[in-house]
Amino acid sequence: MTDRRELAAALREAVRGEVDLGVTARALTTMDASNYRRIPLGVVAPRDADDVAAALSVCREHGVPVVPRGGGTSIAGQATGTGIVLDFTRHMNRLLSLDPEAGTAVVQPGLVLDRLQEAAATHGLRFGPDPSTHSRCTLGGMIGNNSCGSHSVAWGTTADNVRTLSVITARGERLRPGPGWAGAPAGLRELIEGELARLRTGFPDLPRRISGYAVDALLPENRADVARSLCGSEGTLAVLTEAELTLVRAPRARALAVLAYADESGAAQAAAGLLPYRPLTVEGMAADLVPSAADLPRGGAWLFVEAGGDTEAEARAAAEAIVRAADVVDALVVTDPARQRALWRIREDASGTATRMPDSSEAWPGWEDCAVPPARLGAYLRDFRALLAEHGLRGTPYGHFGDGCIHVRIDFDLLTEPGVARFRRFSEELADLVVAHGGSLSGEHGDGQARAELLPRMYGAETVALFERVKGVWDPDGLLNPGMLVRPAPLDTGLRFSPLPREPVDVAFGYPADAGDFSAAVRRCVGVAKCRTTSVSGSAVMCPSFRATGEEEHSTRGRARLLHEMLAGEVVTDGWRSTEVRDALDLCLSCKGCRSDCPVGVDMATYKAEFLHHHYAGRRRPAAHYAMGWLPVWLSWAARTRTAGAANALASVRPLARLAKRLGGIAGGREIPRLAAEPFSRWWRRRRTPAAGEGPLVVLWPDTFTEHLSPSVGRAAVRVLEAAGLRVALPPTLRPRPGGRVGDARSRSALSLLTARRGRVCCGLTYISTGQLDRARAVLRRTLDLLEPVLATDAPLVVLEPSCAAALRTDAPELLHDDPRAAQLASRVLTFAEALERLAPGWTPPAVNRPVTGQTHCHQHAVLGDAPDRRLRAAAGLTGELVGGCCGLAGNFGFERGHDDVSRACAEEQLLPSVREAPKDAVVQADGFSCRTQLEQLGGVRGRHLAEILAQALGEEA
């Protein structure tokens, strides 16, 4: 058995990059995007090729296996290992050179594909292959798997676009493979030249044959291309340190033809017939994978066919010619780049969306990318569907129909012995079916552990034996990625679900989408790693902490992996008390971006609250949990005792402010927000009588921030809502007797004063975000008691603070899943814009007629949606778009000690630049108190709620 301490010491002495054999590093790399799990000894992040050679030398001396890893999005298990994982994403991630004249680029293996595409685009070039994971997959991983992507009908696989490679063998030999036997290890040429007949007859001829080793690339008629033969070898033959790639000329304009068919069979049969029109893509997917709101032509399945041209008109003409040639139910041609991107996102998210069936049951990879000749795709899909039905399984195929390559997630039961046995039987029979159609077991993602055991069914035992001999030439000690491709581990062993608890874990939230099972909620993360993107576009949010730190443990996937290992109990051994999980979750902003942006709806904000609830049960919490978690209590005391002015005065005395921040766990560089001299509800009582008038009644929610810190927002909302003809009331502050008045915030009688319970409504957000879930439940139950007379009517609740609205709409019913009133309350919650749109549809807002800048609140984006807000802004003449991302303050997050750097980095990503670059007359919209505070403290800019913007315009019109 390897002595981990000795190995760590030897690696640290030899390698200049990071060496980490700790719990967190191991837990983060137990899995990729497959069904498999292998526990490594540790992770090394080499700085250069010398570090790679040094790490290989140490591992060889200690008999420790090595697996190279890029983005960790492999679907067959090949990015996992039991020895040392080489992480190329940290340091060896550069574009070394780009020659636009020659159309080539030299890259390191850890470079993310999108970074190469961005650099090449400035010269009108691009790298042809583009998997749906292009925003986070690395070039090294693409070469290892021979990845393809949607444009392979035009530009081929990764192997088709590789010129030369630089590699290091397990025994430390540095080679530069290329055509003409360049860079071949000793003995390879002799081996191949003795098997020429087998190589010429034993490999199916189809565009997406990825399975096995590409040893036929070593035939004389194929230029004896050693570099090409290494593509798809999954890190089992040599370790890549550098690659010279061929770039292609990108068309100046593109048009996307979306062709609708009655079903997937019709789409599959039509795909091959479109290839003579030289399309750039022929992608297929069915209705099961498409969100209901997707803007697609009517049909049950679609082909996404992209055409190129020198001009938009030329591209459109090419796309329209394809439409005329296709026998379709309906069609759509799009030339607007933004709309094209929106449509492509539907297709790219399918790899995550497909992991949940329509009834929310789980589906898994394993047979993710078989490929058959394109002309046989329709027949293959019919037989595939029949085989699914025979085994009682379900799955929705999608993928690269033009290349005959099908992706599918299947609802295998991988948790029980009978389910795993059925998984094996189905795999064996499907392998035979693919071979019968002249296909390849893998058409894009490689064999790994998922399919390598079945390669003899495709190639025969003698060709597989040849693969083993090739492996022996390159890696005679079997050091590199053992268990993959040759001499593989059985396909039904090492499944990642096997160590998870079989009984539901006792948790606080209801997890309704996962049948109340926290393990199932954690299993949602399948590793596609959309959270690892280093930039966001449009209104997207996920994952701001990863973009700020670049660390896997601060990505949604990384945190989900740690929670998985916490439940498994083998690497993370101290359960809910784990400091590793706590530390990874500490920089989670609870922005909820993953709830909407993650293709499978991982909700890390909820998981974090759940973890903190258990982690601190019966123990003292961090000071910030008391200082900011209980903020509603402290602010209410200040209001009742009318000491806001005194508190503000004390906070302005620097020594006292420093002491208060130190005691409260608040970052020293943060200013303490000033309390309002007059709370919103006190202004309400002073200025008016209970609601009257003819318009619909709305109950305006006095959230903690509006009540005590930004009452101007509440006052502005009242003015606008009343200008729109609505009657405004506030929730009760006493739980009234049956038949009491609804929501005037001051219902009192002698009897009620003696018998009623006094209180104020609260969404519990600050308690939820700090994991004080028992307190949150108590607060929410008190709120429901107060709201009973409101819930007895049909009056909606208008919530001005997006984070509070999101908490009421999602957190409350999930936390109080045993109280039907919580779901009833959630259904009543409206945002400010929703209330105006639904209840005052005939009202015309005042004309602002100015550009607008700012950021869509992350909770608004993730939970509430902002379409009504967009329409309201447009009606008011507010032009321009708000940016995505997160402001970085995120409630208590940015105030907590230790979070300031990440908070500022998040603000500098999109929010602050958008404000700095805005026109001078732009209105800065920030609906959340945190967003306004961040703008003021870091940017010196006053942001305003949309209600304030409209209220001011009403005044200007008067």
Image (cartoon, rainbow, N blue to C red):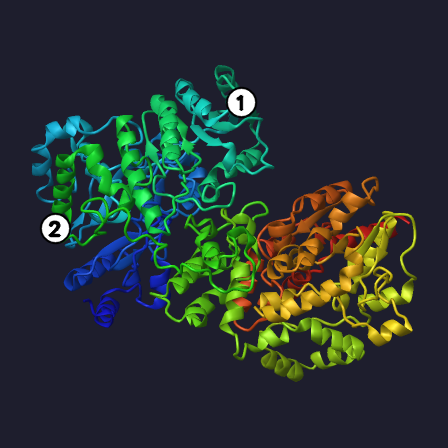
Number of numbered discs visible in the structure rendering: 2
Q: Specify the label residue 476 is tagged with.
A: 2
Q: Mark 1 points at which residue?
A: 316
Left or right of 110? Residue 8 is left
Q: Earlier in the sequence, mark 1 or mark 2?
A: 1
| Residue 944 image-quadrant placement | bottom right
Do we see residue 181 in this rendering? yes
Query: Residue 13, position in %: x, y?
Result: 23, 69
Secondary structure category for the residue under label 2 = loop
Query: Residue 470, position in %: x, y?
Result: 14, 42
| Residue 929 image-quadrant placement | bottom right
Kind of residue at badge 1: Arg
Circle 1: is it few (<14), some (14-19), or many (20+) Cα within 10 Å? many
Vertical position of residue 414 compared to residue 568: above or below: above
Q: Which of 664 and 358 is in front in this view?
A: 358
C-alpha separation, residue under disc 1 versus residue under disc 2? 55 Å
Vertical position of residue 574 compared to residue 224: above or below: below
Q: Specify the label residue 147 is tagged with.
A: none
Query: Residue 191, position in %: x, y?
Result: 8, 38
Task: Identify which residue is drawn at 90% across, 67% down.
Answer: 686
Vertical position of residue 737 compared to residue 794: above or below: below
Q: Are marks 1 and 2 in contact (CB under 8 Å)?
A: no
Kind of residue at badge 2: Pro
Q: Which of marks 1 and 2 is in front?
A: 2
Secondary structure category for the residue under label 1 = helix
Circle 2: is it few (<14), some (14-19), or many (20+) Cα within 10 Å? some
Q: Which of 39 and 176 is in front in this view?
A: 39
Vertical position of residue 719 compared to residue 426: above or below: below
| Residue 192 image-quadrant placement | top left
